[in-house]
Image (tube, grey):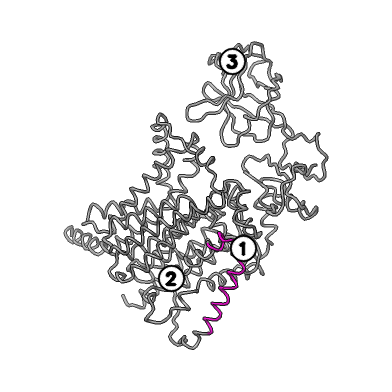
């Protein structure tokens, strides 16, 4: 093979790999987007206006109200750790009187599905003040429960009990059974929560479709004045 | 349009800044750094700049003065050396051009993706904001996990602020610059044709590049500086650089200082590397002394600064440890399980570890192979020890951070490929050909 052929062949392979890289990462499209879409729009598209980090809503508030303090930002979206980063000013202090509630749920709840002999919750909660009531979704119209009910999380094989109570009653389908148990232990976005009803046999357990824990808000909108609102994002005082 | 121009200008600015001091100060054949390649010189300048930035950060020197000093010296030296530059002798360096092209490509990806990782939103971005908004080093106390190192965030803030004070991702373009530079730097030592080097570099980038690593996390900096350290460590074992041991030692210590201020585990990785050199390579007493005292000084400076600014949170540190023996077996099971899963998910390991094992068993072991193996053992030991003594949330910690820890050191094992190609590929090809001839 001539040296010239080797050189051209090498060059062709380099160009091929380069194009594969560009194509794999969709870089032509991304270049086009940067060219025609401004930074602010792209940022909001990634972090949401009133979803996920709600960067759009936060930046709008900062522009409109020209904060000379850092408002307390509470995001109910459990896939987001802290949302304050997008408008945080290190020169200012946090003013807890000014709160921004993002992705605020009307009714905070945990939904539990059966898993072997226990029930586990896929969703998590971070800003609740405790358990309001418990609801059983049943296959039948009612079920008799004579058992302890434990709500807990697991660390290695150790149970961290959140709530423990005795149930000796007939429970109707979708009946709200009040608990009114104040606890912050229910708040965790890192681990699943479990419910164990130890005295129920397999047949009885099979009659329960799901269990819902309705929770109390840590920050209830009724307690504040709403200054700005967009969907379920609020700026309150 | 203006954003695209800004991205290009940002890359040129970084290149301009790291042309100081060696390239424009030492460009004659008598210079101690003359034998080093252009990419080596850029790496050395980068190490120098980041160490300067580190001292500026802990001494609370406003970063704009560092920039002014740099600009003044660079412009002055360019004018001073202008007559010495022979423009006729300047050749196009295709290897360097491809490097720049990749920096541009990754910068476009960063500018488009924009999202931050979990840890970035929780910790790293606040550290960056602290320096971007001209706050002092001790102000880090007001943010979560203040004792996590700050240097990566400081680099981010510096290049975010200068030259345009534009968008935050301008600072992260520096991460892309360091990453691409480190890969082209390690591939440079493979003794093959330049085209093959470029192909190898593209493949290496394709294997390791993922936007997630550029979403404000510091792991990519650890990965890149370990790669650069591996390259200069490789020179320790090369006869050609036997007279350059002093320079190499200083470069390695410079990287050690950077790594221990980027992430806490960086300190362990670079000290393992230095320890492996001390054990495997027969160095003269002067170099050994320098490596040991240099490492100790870096460690003591770290302790001193954390205590002086009262940034070290001992309660948090002690609270994160758990020495209960009865959990150890359970924890070891979890770590081993995730280790075996994640080793297969970091593609570099899938390629380099079999090559390392093959060369170790098949051929007479060279010092550099021993060095590679020794580091692997220390690396695995570190992973077990670090996660065994973490407090109760072992599974959560392992699940979320083990893959990143594995990625951080994965670049080092690229040396296995370098060793194989440079030392054994010739005899490997001969074996293949001879067995092929026998069959036919």
**If the image is split into quadrants, where does the C terminus of chain B sit?**
bottom left
Q: Position of residue A192 (x, y in %)?
A: 57, 32
Q: Eyeballing the image, is A169 above or below B279?
A: above
The residue lying at 71 percent from left, 24 percent from top is: A132
Residue bearing the label numbered 1: B160
Looking at the image, residue A114 sits to the left or right of residue B194; the answer is right
Residue bearing the label numbered 2: B39
Q: Position of residue A35 (x, y in %)?
A: 65, 66
Q: Residues under labels 3 and 1: Cα distance?
A: 58 Å
Q: For mark 3, name the chain.
A: A
Looking at the image, residue B431 sits to the left or right of residue A6; the answer is left
- Tell whether position A160 is magenta: no
Label 1 or label 2, whichever comes before in sequence order = 2
Tell me if mark 3 has few (under 14), some (14-19) or many (20+) residues whose alpha carbon lies within 10 angstroms of its own: some
**Element class at badge 1:** helix
Tell me if mark 1 has few (under 14), some (14-19) or many (20+) residues whose alpha carbon lies within 10 angstroms of its own: many
- The residue nearer to you, when weighing A145 against B80, is B80
Picture quadrant of residue B248: bottom left
The residue lying at 26 percent from left, 58 percent from top is: B367
**If the image is split into quadrants, where does the N terminus of chain B sit?**
bottom right
Q: For mark 1, name the chain.
A: B
Looking at the image, residue B118 sits to the left or right of residue B266; the answer is right
Picture quadrant of residue B369: bottom left
Residue bearing the label numbered 3: A148
């Amino acid at each position: 093979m001539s040296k010239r052929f080797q050189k051209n062949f090498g060059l062709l392979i380099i160009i091929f790999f380069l194009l594969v890289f560009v194509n794999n990462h969709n870089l032509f499209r991304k270049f086009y987007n940067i060219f025609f879409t401004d930074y602010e729009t792209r940022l909001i598209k990634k972090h949401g206006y009133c979803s996920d980090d709600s960067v759009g809503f936060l930046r709008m508030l900062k522009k409109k109200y020209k904060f000379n303090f850092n408002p307390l930002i509470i995001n109910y979206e459990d896939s987001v750790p802290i949302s304050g980063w997008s408008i945080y000013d290190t020169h200012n202090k946090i003013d807890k009187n000014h709160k921004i509630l993002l992705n605020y749920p009307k009714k905070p709840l945990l939904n539990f599905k059966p898993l072997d002999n226990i029930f586990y919750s896929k969703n998590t909660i971070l800003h609740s003040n405790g358990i309001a009531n418990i609801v059983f979704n049943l296959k039948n119209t009612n079920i008799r429960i004579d058992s302890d009910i434990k709500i807990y999380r697991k660390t290695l094989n150790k149970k961290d009990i959140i709530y423990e109570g005795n149930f000796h009653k007939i429970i109707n389908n979708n009946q709200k059974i009040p608990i009114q148990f104040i606890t912050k232990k229910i708040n965790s976005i890192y681990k699943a929560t479990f419910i164990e009803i130890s005295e129920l046999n397999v047949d009885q357990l099979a009659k329960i479709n799901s269990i819902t824990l309705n929770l109390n808000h840590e920050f209830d909108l009724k307690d504040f004045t709403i200054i700005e609102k967009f969907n379920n994002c609020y700026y309150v005082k | 349009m203006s954003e695209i121009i800004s991205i290009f200008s940002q890359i040129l600015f970084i290149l301009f800044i790291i042309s100081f001091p060696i390239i424009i100060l030492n460009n004659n054949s008598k210079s101690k750094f003359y034998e080093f390649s252009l990419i080596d010189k850029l790496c050395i300048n980068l190490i120098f700049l980041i160490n300067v930035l580190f001292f500026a950060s802990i001494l609370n020197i406003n970063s704009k003065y560092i920039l002014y000093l740099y600009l003044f010296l660079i412009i002055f030296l360019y004018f001073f050396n202008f007559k010495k530059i022979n423009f006729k002798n300047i050749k196009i360096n295709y290897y360097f051009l491809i490097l720049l092209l990749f920096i541009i490509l990754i910068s476009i990806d960063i500018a488009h993706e924009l999202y931050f990782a979990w840890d970035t939103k929780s910790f790293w971005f606040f550290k960056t904001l602290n320096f971007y908004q001209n706050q002092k080093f001790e102000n880090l106390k007001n943010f979560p996990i203040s004792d996590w190192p700050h240097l990566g965030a400081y680099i981010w803030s510096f290049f975010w602020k200068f030259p345009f004070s534009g968008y935050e991702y301008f600072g992260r373009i520096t991460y892309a610059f360091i990453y691409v530079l480190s890969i082209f730097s390690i591939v440079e030592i493979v003794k093959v044709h330049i085209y093959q080097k470029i192909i190898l570099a593209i493949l290496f980038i394709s294997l390791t590049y993922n936007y997630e690593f550029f979403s404000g996390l510091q792991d990519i900096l650890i990965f890149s500086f370990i790669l650069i350290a591996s390259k200069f460590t490789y020179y320790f074992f090369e006869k050609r650089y036997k007279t350059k041991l002093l320079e190499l030692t200083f470069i390695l210590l410079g990287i050690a200082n950077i790594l221990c201020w980027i992430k806490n585990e960086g300190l362990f990785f670079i000290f393992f590397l230095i320890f492996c050199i001390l054990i495997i390579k027969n160095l003269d007493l002067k170099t050994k002394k320098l490596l040991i005292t240099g490492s100790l000084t870096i460690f003591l400076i770290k302790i001193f600064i954390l205590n002086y600014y009262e940034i070290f949170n001992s309660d948090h540190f002690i609270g994160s440890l758990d020495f209960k023996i009865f959990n150890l077996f359970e924890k070891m099971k979890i770590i081993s399980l995730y280790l075996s899963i994640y080793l297969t998910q970091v593609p570099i390991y899938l390629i380099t570890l079999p090559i390392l094992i093959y060369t170790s068993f098949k051929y007479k072991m060279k010092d550099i192979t021993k060095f590679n193996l020794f580091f692997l053992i220390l690396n695995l030991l570190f992973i077990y020890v670090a996660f065994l003594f973490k407090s109760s949330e072992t599974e959560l910690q392992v699940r979320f951070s083990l893959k990143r820890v594995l990625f951080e050191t994965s670049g080092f094992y690229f040396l296995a490929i370098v060793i194989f190609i440079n030392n054994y590929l010739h005899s490997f090809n001969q074996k293949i050909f001879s067995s092929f001839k026998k069959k036919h």
